[in-house]
Image (cartoon, helix red, strand yellow):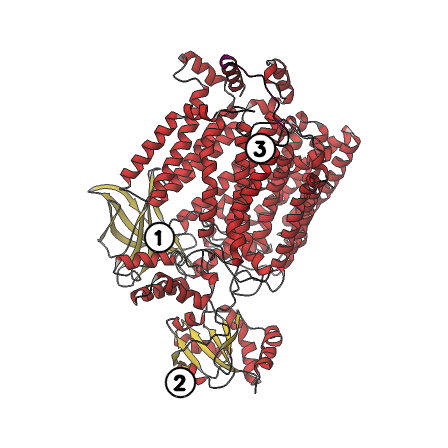
Amino acid sequence: MSWRRAAYLLPLIAFAALAIYLSHGLAPGYNPELLPSALIDKPAPAFDLVGLKGEARLSNRAFADEIVFVNFFASWCVPCREESPVLMDLARRNVIVLYGIDYKDKPEDAEKFLQQYGDPYRRIGVDDSGRTAINFGVYGVPETYAIDRTGHIRWRHVGPLTADVVKKEIMPLLQELGAS
Amino acid sequence: MIRALIAAAILLGVAQAAFAVEPSEMLANPALEARAEAIGKQLRCLVCQNESIEDSGADLAHDLRVLIRERLKAGDSDAQAIKYVTDRYGDFVLLKPPVEPATYLLWFSPFVILAVGAAGAWFYLRRRPTPPDEPLDLNQRRQLERLLIDDQ
Amino acid sequence: MIIELGHFALILALAVALLQAGLTFTGAARNDLNLMAAGRLAAMAQFALIALAFATLVHAYFVSDFSVANVAENSSSAKPLLYKLTSVWGNHEGSMVLWVLILALYGAAIAWFGDAMPPRLCARVLGVKALIAIGFLLFILLTSNPFLRLSPAPEEGMGLNPILQDPGLAFHPPFLYLGYVGFSVAFAFAIAALIDGRVDAAWARWVRPWTLASWCCLTLGIAMGSWWAYYTLGWGGWWFWDPVENASLMPWLAGTALLHSAIVVERRDTLKSWTILLAILTFSLSLVGTFLVRSGVLTSVHAFALDPRRGVFILVLLCIAIGGSLALYAWRAPALEPGGVFAPISREGALLLNNLILASCCATVFIGTLYPLFLDAVGGPKLSVGYPFFDRTFVPLMIPLLLAVGIGPLLAWKRGDVLGALQRLWAAFAAVIAAILIAYYLSHGGPVLSVLGIGLAAWMGAAAVVELADRLRLFRAPWSEVVRRALAQPRASYGMTLAHFGLAVTVAGIAASGFEQQSIALLHLGQTLPVAGYTLRFDGIGKHDGVNYTADRGDFTLLDGTRVVAQLEPERRFFPLQQQTVSKTAIHTNFFADFYLALGDPDNKGGWAVRAYWKPLVPFIWIGGVIMAFGGGVSLSDRRWRVGVAVRRAAKSALPANRSRA
């Protein structure tokens, strides 16, 4: 085949490459604006927040030598309601150590939310200004972070947790980080 | 098209009125405020459809605008303030993709494509020698041009 | 009952499309006039059936029949009638029905006007259109059916998104589709030509009107969308290089290139296989655009994923349509007879440059839009490509083209004289210098790029006028001669002048955005705000409710000294059904500048945030678009295309020998 004839094939070949990329975009796991956390393997940001319902304050100093999950939620967040059963189940089975941070919410509303959907958290901090969330790189709720024994962030999930995510990501993660 | 617009609209709508920098956020020092605006225009609002934090009415955009202004007031340079945000959100938050090996293809391709196209056009034009014309004298040339233009 | 009729009509339309494809391709292969005529009838029947289906859907919206799932999801009874109509296409399923309706409309039009066309060409074109229709009708019936019922029927619907309840946005989709989908005609012509193995001036002449009509509609559709974003979104942006916007810009760029290269095929019988490729690519870009905005590949929401089934279906359609046509191209295009030669500096050369730059610009937008996906697919970092990328690549690429727009029409065919052209453009040079000086002075030494941009716009506009004047021999021949020439000019040449002039106007509007001024403040009643030499006074605030929203409306007076220029009433509307707040800006325009006012949040102590802008020349952006589309329309009305090829051939034989093609 002469060069000239081969050149006529170029558009078709280019399109084939395009089709492959476009199909990648259709793969179930792909979400164009699902960001990987910029803080993976970096130390978790320090924070010290007022507790909900007059409880003790929540700070990262409380995470001594444990694998800890931090879940950002809010009463006004619809997907948070969808993940509540999953979190409640994890708490009931004592699978993980779970702390909650109430993002930009009125404490009364948060309390009503927890009354209605259950409170799976060991303790809850109130991030009224949203500054702690920004330090974590949160861009929406719900988001869940896993912090290892040395205080480094090892995993983040954007969006509501599902049983699938627990099975496929959290359990292997716990294995990897050496849960007690 | 419509679905994307709806998604955009939902996100914009949830975030109060489609509005941006509020008078209460603005810094008193106009030079600092100008810098803050310029930086804000480079940072993407992560919960919006393709807007900068300066242009977006979203809560997160508001928080980041306030943050940038605080950093500038605290004495950060432009680069430091931007780094403060990219440290937390990654390079995705930059509207202008950084020029690095991963993006050479992106940044250079327009000009490469133009060059390749131009080369292709050049080869196309050269594929046959232009047939030699008898030179026309000035009057004949003028007449010819007039006819050509007439015919349009 | 009625909606089921519509559903049935759509299924029937699919059957007719299958029949149409069979009749036309077989008829063309066997050169059987009866089969081909039947194919034309099928095309018209297909349109009638889809129109019926569409009508039943519209009816369901008008009577607010919430037992139809699509109506329940997208409409409500308390909505104004206009928006009930526009809700039909304000959602995915309904808009797809509009898509195939317009596809069938163009098909029926081709069938109707097909008498003058060679029958086999007409048949094959209709055949390709039928194949496309089959694909999309299947898509609708299998994955996006708006005719399904909901049981039990809800009392009330979910309403149309408030941001879409706007006259500007209401008609933006139909115009866009008349554009995108219209390029399917050029595509069909290209496929027909490849099957036939022949591209000639006649083919180019047949293609041009359809491409031109689509281009006009797309230009208007994009202008409308941009204008809507401007007055709705609260800070006066009008182009964001958003993937959805890019999806409409790419076919426009390719379509513009196609219009110009088709001229070369028609005039000089050359650049043929490139033009065929371009015709295929333009519609392919429309298809890719349709894919991108409906598959979820380029959108996001902080929640669960979208249904990928639709995306997969469209991708398969794309592979068949685009892959198939490009394969046909690779196979048949090398056999096309190469045409005339031309010197690089010539009218054809300028048109080739036009194509080169437009294609590069289109590729740039394409790469920028899809780069994040590409990086993700090869395992690279997660990056986003925003407006800074496009500003730094698209704009520098376009500038040489905009400069060339001034000179190109003045070059002769086959071999042009640039120096001679530039000499004839002395008036344009003078206009550039004058414009730059005026812009500099009026803007008190504004940004360099904006001032130069105004100069560029002046160049383009003046050059268009000079070219016309030159052709009419203005100031060089007696008035009677000038008038005679003016009347004898083909409309297409006026169309060209108008379109290029319109482009200049748009460029001026874009360049002037550097001159805008803004003022933001928290105002209490009675306070004033200075903006760009005017004074804005906050006179009052009150409640002002609409059919399906409550609103706060501010009363402002714009003063020039003590003279009242305008009363402005921006609003913040709250839609209880969707729990959304939407800002309605107040704009006062004198067509040369806009005074733009948006009402922000109250501080609950009597103060309201107010953002005011003075935007010089911004209306030109859309006025230019309208002029361009009008120019296209004028071209479209040119008699020559309706009279056909035979007349041209007769005229050609009367020309002197040295004018004929080499």
| Viewer-side residue, A4 vs C192 | A4
Q: Examine the rendered structure and indicate whether residue C510 appears above or below residue B90.
A: above
Task: Answer with left or right where residue C571 lies relative to residue C382.
Answer: left
Let me know if marks 1 and 2 both belong to one chain.
no
- Of marks 1 and 3, which one's residue comes earlier in the chain? 3
Could you classify mark 3 by the number of other residues whose Cα lies within 10 Å: few (under 14), some (14-19), or many (20 or more)?
many
Q: Give the residue type that dot 1 points to.
A: Glu
Q: Where residue C571 is drawn, which disc sits there?
A: 1
Q: Which residues are magenta?
A: B125-139
> Residue most toward the right?
C30
Q: For mark 3, what is the residue?
A: C261
Work out whether residue C190 can be spotted: yes
Q: Examine the rendered structure and indicate whether residue A105 appears above or below residue C364.
A: below
Which label sits in the foreground, 2 or 3? 3
Cα distance between the residues tagged 1 and 3: 48 Å
Q: For mark 2, what is the residue?
A: A55
- The spot of residue A146 in percent (x, y) is 52, 77
Q: Give the residue type that dot 2 points to.
A: Glu
Q: Residue at x 62, y 73 (%)?
A: A164
Q: Are marks 2 and 3 in contact (CB under 8 Å)?
A: no
- The spot of residue B32 in percent (x, y) is 29, 59
Identify the image quadrant of residue A132: bottom left
Q: Give the residue type that dot 3 points to.
A: Ser
Could you classify mark 1 by the number of other residues whose Cα lies within 10 Å: few (under 14), some (14-19), or many (20 or more)?
many
Image quadrant holding the C terminus of chain C, namely top right
